[in-house]
Image: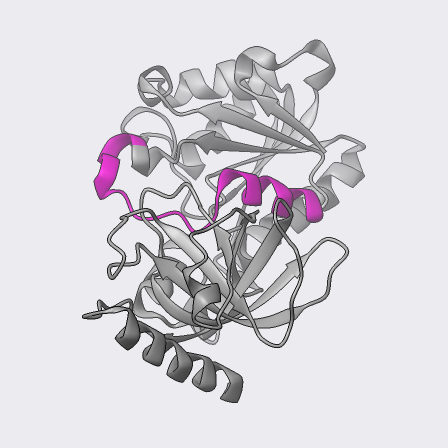
């Protein structure tokens, strides 16, 4: 899969495509339905399927630190789209220029001149352009003028729940990882390279893998039952933590995972952590002894799970 950074990187060879546009945060089951239809149309037209997405997320541009947390990192999103069989991902930098581009300007500059779109597929709630003035009807009108077809996908519902990135964020915030997994189509995950920590867990008999994700704030915090997987390794159960370790007061966001009954030197390896069940919230303790005792109880609960 080819990743194209910015419309300025488009070449004549990128002209002629089947396109979908969106944030695709989480690459959830609704997004998967869009991708499957996109690939089907691309095969019919013998054209590459292209996903256009944005970095940063538009809500982060407009709301700053008040924006909702991401479900996944940009790298995770690209990897998920690759696994789904997308041919190209075009990542547009969401900045002042793009925010002020009119809906018609976006269509003309990107879809027509940049990608030579032959077919465009979007979600049923898709909006675009300055002040979100463009919608499906506007896009369909542009398609008639510029010579590309337009279609949308109906809302996907799971157990009578509308699948959306917003709904998944709500589930994660509540600690309802089971429902989040149903909407995502897989457990919520964190990936990263294992780094050296301060070795405190080892002193208490709970050595941990340490990852330092670059989130402004995570969608969940606390203690969790998890499974860890890495290239060439196995699927290992573990006790996971996400937070800023209030008892240590270093304020650095960390993901720590204690593997159950398994030891390995994983420093530098990229590890994927699947979060299955929330055990408790992140809380502060008076001292390290209290923390160590609670860790023993947490691990016992996770073993039962």
- Up the image or down, 116 lies above or below 57; here it is above
Q: Position of residue 201 (x, y in %)?
A: 44, 65
Does residue 230 lie above or below 80 as drawn? below
In the image, 272 versus 70, the foreground residue is 272
**Prevailing SS of the magenta stretch:** helix
Relative to 22, residue 258 above or below:
below
Question: Which x, y percent locates residue 78?
Answer: 60, 39
Q: Residue furthest left?
A: 286
| Residue 133 occupies quadrant | top left
Asked if residue 263 can be seen in this view, the reply is yes
Residue at 38% from the left image edge and 43% from the top image edge: 215
The one of 236 and 162 positioned closer to us in this rendering: 236
Residue at 54% from the left image edge and 16% from the top image edge: 7
Tell me where residue 66 appears, x and y as whole percent. Answer: 21, 42
Horizontal arrangement in the rendering, residue 139 relative to residue 13 (left or right): left
293 sits left or right of 18 in the view:
left
Taking the view exactly as shown, the residue that stands out farthest to the bottom is 304
Is there any visible trace of residue 157 in the rendered image? no
Q: Which span of residues is magenta-colored?
A: 61-84
* Percent position of residue 62, x then y: 25, 32
Residue 143 is a magenta residue: no
Q: How is the image coloured?
A: one colour
- In this rendering, the answer to whether 212 lies above or below 298 is above
| Residue at 79 percent of width and 39 percent of height | 44
């Amino acid at each position: 899969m080819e990743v194209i950074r910015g419309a300025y990187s488009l070449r004549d060879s990128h002209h002629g495509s089947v396109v979908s546009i969106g944030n695709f945060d989480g690459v959830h089951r609704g997004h998967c339905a869009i991708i499957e239809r996109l690939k089907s149309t691309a095969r019919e037209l013998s054209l590459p399927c292209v996903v256009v997405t944005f970095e940063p997320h538009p809500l982060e541009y407009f709301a700053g630190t008040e924006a909702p947390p991401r479900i996944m990192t940009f790298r995770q999103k690209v990897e998920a789209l690759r696994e789904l069989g997308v041919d190209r991902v075009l990542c547009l930098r969401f900045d002042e220029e793009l925010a002020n581009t009119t809906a018609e300007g976006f269509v003309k500059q990107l879809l027509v001149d940049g990608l030579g779109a032959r077919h465009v597929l979007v979600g049923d709630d898709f909006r675009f352009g300055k002040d979100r003035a463009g919608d499906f009807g506007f896009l369909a009108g542009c398609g008639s003028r510029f010579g590309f077809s337009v279609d949308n996908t109906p809302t996907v519902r799971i157990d009578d729940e509308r699948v959306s990135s917003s709904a998944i964020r709500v589930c994660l915030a509540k600690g309802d990882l089971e429902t989040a997994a149903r909407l995502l189509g897989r457990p919520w995950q964190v990936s990263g390279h294992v780094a050296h920590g301060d070795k405190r867990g080892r002193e208490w008999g709970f050595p941990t893998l340490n990852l330092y994700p670059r989130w402004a704030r995570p969608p969940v915090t606390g203690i969790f039952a998890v499974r860890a997987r890495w290239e060439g390794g196995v699927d290992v159960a573990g006790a996971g933590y996400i937070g800023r370790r209030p008892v240590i007061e270093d304020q650095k966001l960390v993901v720590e995972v204690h593997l159950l009954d398994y030891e390995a030197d994983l420093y530098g390896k990229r590890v994927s952590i699947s979060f299955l069940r929330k055990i408790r919230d992140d809380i502060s303790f008076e001292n390290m002894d209290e923390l160590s005792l609670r860790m023993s109880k947490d691990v016992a609960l996770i073993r039962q799970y």
